[in-house]
Amino acid sequence: VSERTLVLIKPDAVQRGLVGEIISRYERKGLAIVAMDQRTIDASQSDAHYAEHVDKPFYPGLREFITSGPLVALVLEGDQAIDVVRQMNGATDSRTAAPGTIRGDLSLSKSENLVHASDSPDSAKRELAIWFPHLG
Ligand code: CMP
């Protein structure tokens, strides 16, 4: 079943010049880029996106990081795209993410982990409405 998922290529990836490498992986997999936009978000946008994390102890640092510079927001589409992209990204903690994944190959940090992707159909729906409301 074809799905859409929201991906963020985070400020660490932009700063390190890894945007092309990361997008290339998704393209080579066969996912379609439905929308793509480079933005710098503010604290309220971070709070909306990370609503489920705002009360967690790591959230102040996460908000500082995610608002620290430009990120690239993408809508990717394809068969089982939500799960496929999460598999490609690898485990949240890049230190233990499997080799072959984006985090496993390109990052060594638990918090600055290069990418975000929607983790379920419900979160994809919620996040797509926040980031790309015009897509419907
Ligand atoms: P992401 O997939 O964007 O979802 C929540 C983010 O919070 C996660 O990637 C990490 O960047 C960050 N994160 C999750 N857990 C921790 C943690 N224990 N310490 C620091 N950052 C975390």
Image: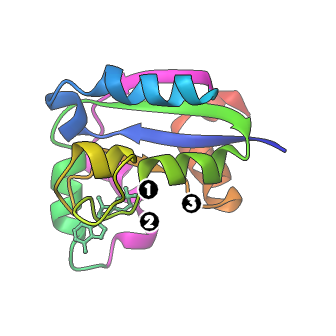
Amino acid beneath label 2: Ala
Q: Within the displayed image, which quadrant is ligand 1 positioned in?
A: bottom left
- Quadrant containing the N terminus is top right
Crowd around label 2: few <14 · some 14–19 · many ≥20 (10 Å): few
Q: Position of residue 21 (x, y in %)?
A: 33, 25
Circle 2 sits on which residue?
51
Q: Is residue 78 left or right of residue 59?
A: right
Looking at numbered disc 1 in the image, what kind of residue is underneath it?
Ala
Which corner quadrant of the image does residue 59 belong to? Answer: bottom left
Residue at point 24%, 30% (across, down): 70
The CA distance from mark 3 to mark 2 is 14 Å
* Residue range highlighted in magenta: 32-55
> Residue at 54% across / 44% down in the picture?
130
Q: Is residue 33 magenta?
A: yes
Q: Which residue is mark 1?
A: 48
Specify whether residue 25 is painted magenta.
no
User: Can you name the residue that lies furthest to the right here?
Assistant: 1
What residue is rendered at 58% in x and 32% in y? 75
- Helix, strand or loop at disc 3? loop
Where does residue 25 sit, x and y in percent of width and height?
45, 29
Which disc number belongs to residue 119? Answer: 3
Verify CB contact (< 8 Å) between mark 1 and mark 2. Answer: yes
Could you say which is closer to the camera, residue 95 or residue 33?
A: 95
Say which of 33 and 96 sits in front. 96
Does the beta carbon at disc 3 come under 8 Å from ligand 1? yes
Observer-nearest of 113 and 72: 113
The local crowd at label 1, few if under 14, some if 14 to 19, many if 20 or more residues have their Cα within 10 Å, is some
